[in-house]
Structure formats: C-alpha cells, structure tokens
Amino acid sequence: MVDLALSEEGDLKLQQFGEYLDEIIWTRAFPTVGTARDEAPSGQSSKLTVAGAEMMRKAVRTDKSRPLRIKKRKSVETETDKDLQWQFDAPASMISRYVKDAAADQLAKMPSNGRKQ
C-alpha cells in the first residue's frame, strides 16, 4: 500500500509505504541496507550508535556500488507479436498466447469441407 496526501496546491505527496511494500523494497532493492537496518546497534532513543551509523554507511556504499541486473526481454515470434508488444508493452509470452488464440479462432471459423482456399 502507498499512503498519499493531497496538498493544498492539488499535488499528491508520498507520505509512506505500507509495511508489506516497505519490506519488499528493503529486501529486493537494497538487501545490504535492509539487513543493516535490522542489525545495526542503536541507543535507547532508537538512534544509531557510532558503530551502527558506520555499519549503515558501509551498507549504503555496498548497495550503491552493486551492479543493476537488467533483465533482457524475451523476443516474440512474429512481426504481429512484435507490433503488439511495442503497442501494449506486454510480456512476450502473453502477446504470443493471444495471437495464437486469435489465429486458432479464425481457423476454426473457416469451412473445413468443400473447396480449399
């Protein structure tokens, strides 16, 4: 869940992420910082100690230097698939399935007896 607030000017302002989404962000996007947040030593007022602050700085440097894993998009089978994928920005498997289903429907409507076309 995302908590948004409407400003007086009519703009949306991000207040906070929900607990579930917050956990996903820390574990997937910044795993080292997420671990450091849980394990860094803090004082009585929940502020990080000197050692905890150093642990967080090191975790941030590690996550910032981590290479991004950009997934290569699977290629589609036909030019029609390619056009549809470009238009809808959808996964190749979904586009291919819809095109195959549409082609099967068209073939089913064609007469199977009599003169071949």
Image (tube, rainbow, N blue to C red):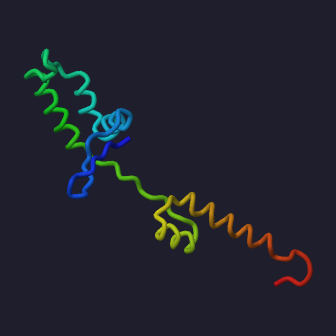
Q: Image quarter for residue 64?
A: top left
Note whether 51 is above or below 10 in the view shown: above
> For the point 16% across and 30% down, which residue is it?
56
Question: Taking 101 as reference, is 111 above or below it?
Answer: below
The answer to whether residue 26 is above or below residue 96 is above
Q: Which percent across, then down, holds residue 61? A: 16, 38
Could you tell me residue 10's position as x and y percent?
25, 58
In this rendered view, identify the residue nearer to me: 109 or 77. Answer: 109
Which of the image's four quarters has the N terminus?
Answer: top left
Residue at horizontal 51 percent and vertical 73 percent from the top: 83
Q: Quadrant of the C terminus?
A: bottom right
Left/right of residue 29 with respect to residue 109 in the rendered view: left
Residue 41 x %, y %: 17, 19
Residue at the front extreme? Answer: 8
Q: Is residue 21 left or right of residue 88?
A: left
**Residue 54 x/y as whole percent:** 11, 27
Residue positioned most to the right: 114
Q: What residue is rendered at 80% in x and 73% in y?
A: 109
Left or right side of 104 for 75: left
- In which quarter of the view is residue 17 placed? top left
Does 3 appear above or below 90? above
Left or right: where 111 falls relative to 42: right
**Displayed quadrant of residue 99:** bottom right
Most foreground residue, 87 or 67: 87
Total marks in image: 0
Q: Which residue sits at x=56%, y=57%?
A: 93
